[in-house]
Image (cartoon, rainbow, N blue to C red):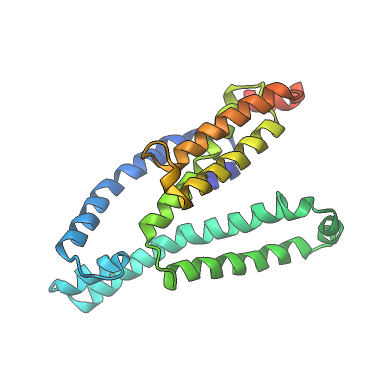
Amino acid sequence: MKAFAAKSDRTIKLTVVLYPTFQIFLVPILIIGFAAVLAFPNVTPADSILPHVLLQMDLPVILIGLVCAGTLAASMSSGDAIVHAAASVAVRDGLSKSPSLANWMKAEGNERTLIRILVVVISLIAYYFAVFSETDIVSLLLGAYGGIAQMFPLVFAMFYWPRANGKGALAGLIGGIVVTLFFLYNPEFKPLPMHEGIYGLIANLALLIGISLATEPEERERIERYSEL
């Protein structure tokens, strides 16, 4: 989300380099987490394995509290940015396009109020999945990344395929998400045992290319703004 709000092309390029580097540091953390799940198989839910392992160790209570507080702070630093970005995108790129809301949102403060309301709604949905849902965090992430992956063909085409247009991008995005959700909830229909996001990407690319070639291209001035990056 933060990459799409970059103030310059240098920031985007720096993000592309640093973010994958940061992911490398997650590998040993994942290994420790999976090893802990195998060492303590009866811990439920499995997402609570970190505090369980800390409580099994002979560590001062203050240190355990600091570790848990640090984990919570790290999750909040990403969580609040994602929630606010999701609410802003939903309002500016979604609800603001509605004729019934467009005029109302022009008044000072109305757009900000609507974003705040959506922040609360999205937070409540996240709270439900975190506390009450029986779906574990790994399954949630795997399902979510299938949808997030549908952004890749659009971003790639935006910079490297000038013939792509908005209609093709929208059709590819919607089609990819629909296919991903279909195989997510109906895995028995998968031709091959692959992640549902891959099937979504195949449909996404087919629609992006097909619809873009079948419709009028974007204006040259608009394309040049992206090609200059």
| Quarter location, residue 53 | bottom left
Image spot of residue 172 (x, y percent)? 61, 35
Image spot of residue 138 (x, y percent)? 36, 56
Image quadrant holding the C terminus, namely top right
Residue 55 seen in the current view: yes
* Most foreground residue, 146 or 51: 146
| Quarter location, residue 225 | top right
* Most foreground residue, 229 or 53: 53
Q: Is residue 10 left or right of residue 117?
A: left
Q: Residue at x 17, y 59 (%)?
A: 38
Q: Residue at x 52, y 49 (%)?
A: 181
Which residue, as the protein is rendered here, is positioned at the far left? 58
Image spot of residue 152 (x, y percent)? 52, 35
* Most foreground residue, 111 or 35: 35
* Most foreground residue, 44 or 35: 44
Residue 158 seen in the current view: no
Which residue, as the protein is rendered here, is positioned at the far right? 103
From what the image shows, is residue 173 above or below residue 129? above
Image spot of residue 109 (x, y percent)? 77, 64
From what the image shows, is residue 75 above or below residue 224? below
From what the image shows, is residue 167 above or below residue 160? below
Q: Is residue 36 left or right of residue 223?
A: left
Looking at the image, how many numbered discs can be counted on the residues?
0
Q: Residue at x 68, y 62 (%)?
A: 115
Which residue, as the protein is rendered here, is positioned at the far bottom? 61
| Quarter location, residue 101 | bottom right
